[in-house]
């Protein structure tokens, strides 16, 4: 399924304060036609116009959020309707931690759109409740908690530029379990079955990006077997993602601290995936440097 053969419609939604305006600006810079704060009921008419016009319009991105008030509650029904249209439809969901969102609202000295007479946290909790179903069905989720506006813009460019639109975008992420599971992971693998280089004094100061640590990790019993079998198991999953028009996936590999084992294995998995046809691979080490 090639996304360049059908009109592309990207729905941008998510938490207030998570960066929707930054994303909209970045998409415009990439040549998308962006419509902001569209009532969900207008999705079908605008997509029909987009599909049926004789002049091919740029790719269309629509920003929809709780500013739509009571209309926003019909978003899921309207998305289901659009599934039957001849469109390359994707949903991008933006989120951030409560602490990050509170800080952002306090910095701009604006209330949360749903807080009413309550607190910012009250508004955030209500918004998360209303968005739960949309988040669960989103094609891609970006957690912007640790991203500034420039980093978020670059992330959008990496994932939504014209040359990337027909490829499956895979992020292989290392992480530390003690810092929590990645909220945007589609698949999670556990590297804690491998002896921890942390307990080797000569390796402790280094990371999985250093050759001596990587060689140690990959030489342990079961490590190479794990990588080979995991890549084999991923192949039907990735083919299924493409056939279901899922264009973004995050594969997370975790160890205790996200410094040694997960980094080395994530790098190896990413290297091997890079040769897969129709796949573009990025690598991210979420917790490297936190220790």
Image (spheres, rainbow, N blue to C red):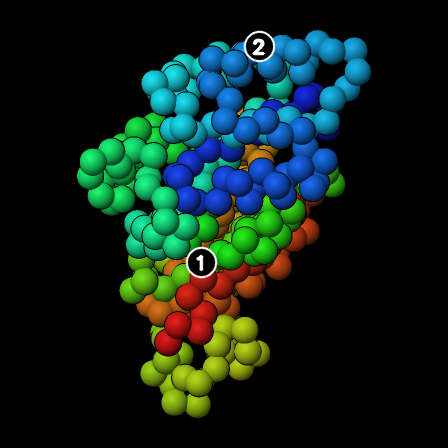
**Looking at the picture, does residue 79 appear above or below residue 152?**
above
Q: Position of residue 82 (x, y in %)?
A: 52, 15
**Looking at the picture, does residue 268 appear above or below residue 24?**
below
Residue matched to label 1: 146
Left or right, 128 with respect to 201, comes to left
Disc 1 to disc 2: CB gap under 8 Å:
no
**Looking at the picture, does residue 128 appear above or below residue 5?**
below
Frontmost residue, 215 versus 23 = 23
Frontmost residue, 212 versus 142 = 142
Q: Position of residue 263 (x, y in %)?
A: 48, 67
Q: Quadrant of the C terminus?
A: bottom left
Q: Residue at x 30, y 29 (%)?
A: 130
**Looking at the picture, does residue 268 appear above or below residue 66?**
below
Frontmost residue, 9 versus 19 = 19
Residue 232 marker: none
Q: Quadrant of the N terminus?
A: top right
Secondary structure of the residue carrying numbered label 2 = helix
Q: Residue at x 41, y 44 (%)?
A: 17
Residue matched to label 2: 45
Q: Residue furthest front?
A: 109
Q: Residue furthest left?
A: 118
Q: Residue at x 41, y 50 (%)?
A: 108
Q: Residue furthest bottom?
A: 202
Q: Position of residue 29 (x, y in %)?
A: 69, 41
Secondary structure of the residue carrying numbered label 1 = loop
Q: Position of residue 229 (x, y in %)?
A: 49, 52
Left or right, 285 with respect to 201, comes to right
């Amino acid at each position: 399924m090639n996304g360049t053969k059908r009109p592309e419609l990207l729905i941008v939604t998510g938490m207030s304060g998570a960066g929707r305006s930054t994303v909209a600006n970045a998409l415009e810079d990439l040549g998308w036609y962006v419509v902001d704060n569209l009532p969900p009921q207008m999705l079908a008419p605008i997509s029909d116009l987009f599909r049926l016009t004789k002049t091919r319009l740029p790719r269309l991105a629509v920003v929809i959020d709780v500013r739509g008030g009571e209309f926003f509650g019909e978003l899921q029904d309207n998305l289901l309707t659009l599934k039957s249209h001849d469109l390359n439809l994707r949903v991008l969901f933006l989120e951030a931690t409560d602490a990050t969102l509170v800080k952002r609202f306090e910095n701009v000295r604006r209330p949360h759109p749903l807080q009413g007479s309550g607190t910012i946290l009250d508004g955030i909790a209500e918004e998360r409740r209303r968005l739960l179903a949309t988040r669960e069905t989103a094609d891609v989720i970006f957690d912007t908690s640790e991203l500034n506006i420039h980093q978020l813009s670059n992330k959008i460019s990496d994932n939504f530029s014209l040359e990337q639109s027909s490829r499956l975008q895979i992020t292989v992420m290392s992480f530390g379990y003690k810092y929590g599971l990645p909220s945007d992971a589609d698949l999670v693998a556990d590297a804690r079955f491998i002896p921890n280089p942390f307990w080797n004094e000569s390796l402790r100061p280094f990371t999985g990006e250093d050759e001596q640590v990587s060689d140690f990790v990959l030489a342990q019993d079961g490590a190479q077997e794990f990588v080979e079998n995991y890549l084999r198991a991923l192949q039907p999953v990735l083919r299924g993602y493409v056939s279901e028009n899922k264009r973004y996936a995050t594969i997370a590999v975790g160890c205790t601290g996200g410094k040694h084992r997960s980094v080395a294995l994530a790098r190896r998995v990413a290297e091997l995936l890079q040769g897969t046809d129709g796949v573009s691979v990025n690598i991210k080490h979420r917790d490297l440097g936190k220790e």
